[in-house]
Amino acid sequence: MKKILPLEPKHIPDSLALFNQGVVSLDEWELLTQGAYSHNSLLSYRNDWHVFADFCHGQGVTAVPCAITTLRRFAELAAQHRKISVIRRVVVTVGLVHRLHQQRDPSKHREVKYAMARLLQAKLPESKEATPFHAQHMIQLNEQLAGSQRLQDLRDRLVWSLSYEGLLKRSELAALTTDDLITQGTQTFIIVRDQRVALSEQTAMLVAQWLDKTGMNHGPLLRRINKHGHLGETALDPSSIYRVFRRASRLLGESVTFSGQSPRVGASRALANKGMTIKQIQHLGRWKSPAMPAQYVGNTIASEQAKARYRHKKLTE
C-alpha cells in the first residue's frame, strides 16, 4: 500500500459519519487518500466501499469501525455470487478505510485471513494445480528407456531426473551449463542460482553417460536434438522441456498430464512426507516465499498467508 498519513483526529468524526452513510464522492475519496491514487483506482475504491457499506446497513452494524466477524461474514456471503478477486479487493478497501481513520484494520486479523484462504481454495478446482511427478514415475521411465541407444531418450531421462531431484523450474533447467557440474569425491552436484544441489548416484551416472555420449565439455548441458537425432548447439528451452514432460505422460500411459511444474509439486510432497518443514522446502526449491510449497503440500491456509505477506512486501518496497 502507498504510504498515506491517517486523518488528523479532529477530522475523523465527520469523515466516519460520511463513510458510514455508504455513498462517498470521488472528491471525498481523493481527499482521504491525499491524491495518491488514479481516477480509476478511486472509482474502484468508491464502488467497493459502497458494496460493503450496503452489506453493513442490511446487517444493522457500522461499516467503520466494523467487527472482525462482520468482515468475515461479508466475505463468506459474497462468495456465493461474487468472484474471489472482487471479494479480496473489497477486503483491501475496508482495511484502507480503517487505517486512514486510525481504526484497527479488520482485514489483518487471522480470522479474516483464514476465511479468505478457505474461500479461495473452494473456488479453485483441483485441475488448476500441476499434476505431481513422483519418484515412482521417474523410476518407471528410467526402467522403460534404460536399454535405449537414442540420444533423445538419454536426454529426456536426464531432464526428468534433474528436475525432480533439484526441484528445478524449467528456466533453471534450461540455464544449466557444463560449468554448473561439480564432482567432489564420489558426490556430484549441480549449481543452481548459487545453491549446491546434490545428485543421486543414478542421476550422476546419467550425467556421466550424457557427457560421454555427446562429447560435451562446455556450453549448455541440455540441448536440442533435431529430427535426425543430431545434437544441436542451443539449449533446450522451457517450451521444449514442457514437451518432454508431455512425453512422460504418454510413455507411462497416465490419464493425467504432466507439465514442467510437476516435478516441483511431486518433490515438495515427498520432502514433506519425510518430515521437512515448509521453510526447508522453500529453501531447497529456491522460492521467494513459502506460499507455493505450502500449497503444493496441501497447507492452503499457510499458503494464502504467505502469498498475502509477499504481496504486501512487494507493494511497500
Image: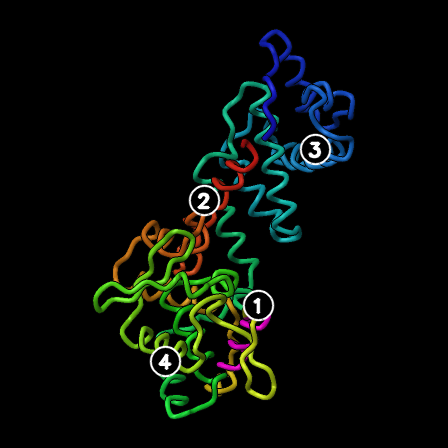
Pointer 4 residue: 209
Q: Are marks 1 and 3 in contact (CB under 8 Å)?
A: no
| Image position, residue 159 (x, y; %) | 45, 73
Q: Which residue is more in the foreground, 111 or 135?
A: 135
The residue carrying pointer 3 sits among few (fewer than 14), some (14 to 19) or many (20 or more) residues within 10 Å by Cα, namely: many
Element at label 4: helix
Nearer the camera: disc 3 or disc 2: 2
The residue shown at (45%, 44%) is: 305
| Residue 221 part of the magenta-drawn span | no
Above-or-below relation of 24 to 132? above
Mark 2 closeness class: few <14, some 14–19, many ≥20 residues within 10 Å? some
Residue in the picture at 60% in, 32% down: 94
Could you tell me the amino acid type at mark 3? Answer: Tyr
Which numbered dot is residue 237? 1
Say which mark, if any, is on residue 305. 2
**Regarding mark 1 in the picture, which secondary structure is present there?**
loop
Please tell me whether mark 4 or mark 2 is closer to you in this view.
4
Q: Nearer the viewer, mark 2 or mark 1?
A: 1
**Magenta includes 245?**
yes
**Where does the image place residue 58, in percent across and percent down from the top left?**
65, 36
Quadrant into which the C terminus falls: top right
If you read the primary sequence from the N terminus, does the residue marked by circle 2 or circle 1 appear first? 1
